[in-house]
Amino acid sequence: MARTGNRSKSGRKWSAQVIRTSNAMDTKSNIFKADDPAKIARSLKNSAVKSHRRKGTPFQSAMSALNFYINRAGKNLSDSRKNLLEKAKDELRKAFGKDDDKTNKDAEK
């Protein structure tokens, strides 16, 4: 039996519908393809702060957008690209003054 996975009757993935219909913040085109983690973080922060359509804090919205992209790319994301996006998460934490939280959690492990 063929498995349909996350596709609807039209053959589209649920994530495509989320991107089309979501009332979340708007991000700069192709920002996740940038080669500078700090640039990605700055752009996400600016988008999150300017957005009036977000439900959580600007930090939560920006980090959620980055995680959504990483998770949806999945196996198609090269190790080097994934590492760059993980660095962008660290830069995002710094941009919002959250870098101490991650340091404390790492120290507790």
Image (cartoon, rainbow, N blue to C red):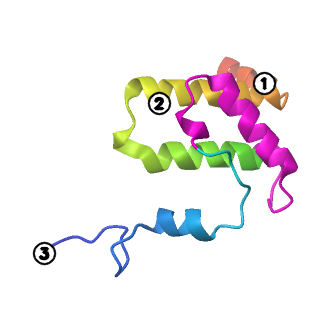
Q: Nearer the viewer, mark 3 or mark 1?
A: 1
Does 91 sit above or below residue 56?
above
Q: CA distance from mark 3 to mark 1?
A: 48 Å
Q: Which residue is mark 3?
A: 1
Q: Which residue is mark 1?
A: 94
Amino acid residing under circle 1: Lys
Q: Quadrant of residue 95?
A: top right
* Residue 88 figure quarter: top right
Name which residue lies at 61% across and 38% down. 31
The residue at 71%/67% (across/down) is 23
What's under tag 3, amino acid-wise? Met
- Give the magenta-colored segment's residue range: 30-59
Q: Secondary structure at mark 3?
A: loop
Dominant secondary structure of the residues highlighted in magenta in the image: helix
Confirm or deny contact between disc 3 and disc 1 (CB under 8 A): no
Distance from disc 2 to disc 3, alpha carbons, whole Å, reads 34 Å
**Foreground residue among 11 and 92:** 11
Q: Is residue 93 magenta?
A: no
Horizontal side of residue 63 vs 30, given as left or right: right
**91 over 70 or under it: above or below:** above
Q: Is residue 58 magenta?
A: yes
Relative depth, front residue between 58 and 43: 43
Cα separation between marks 2 and 1: 19 Å
Q: Is residue 45 above or below residue 56?
A: above
Left or right: residue 79 compared with residue 36: left
User: What kind of residue is marked 2?
Assistant: Lys
Q: Which residue is mark 2?
A: 82
Of the numbered discs 2 and 3, the one sitting upstream in the chain is 3
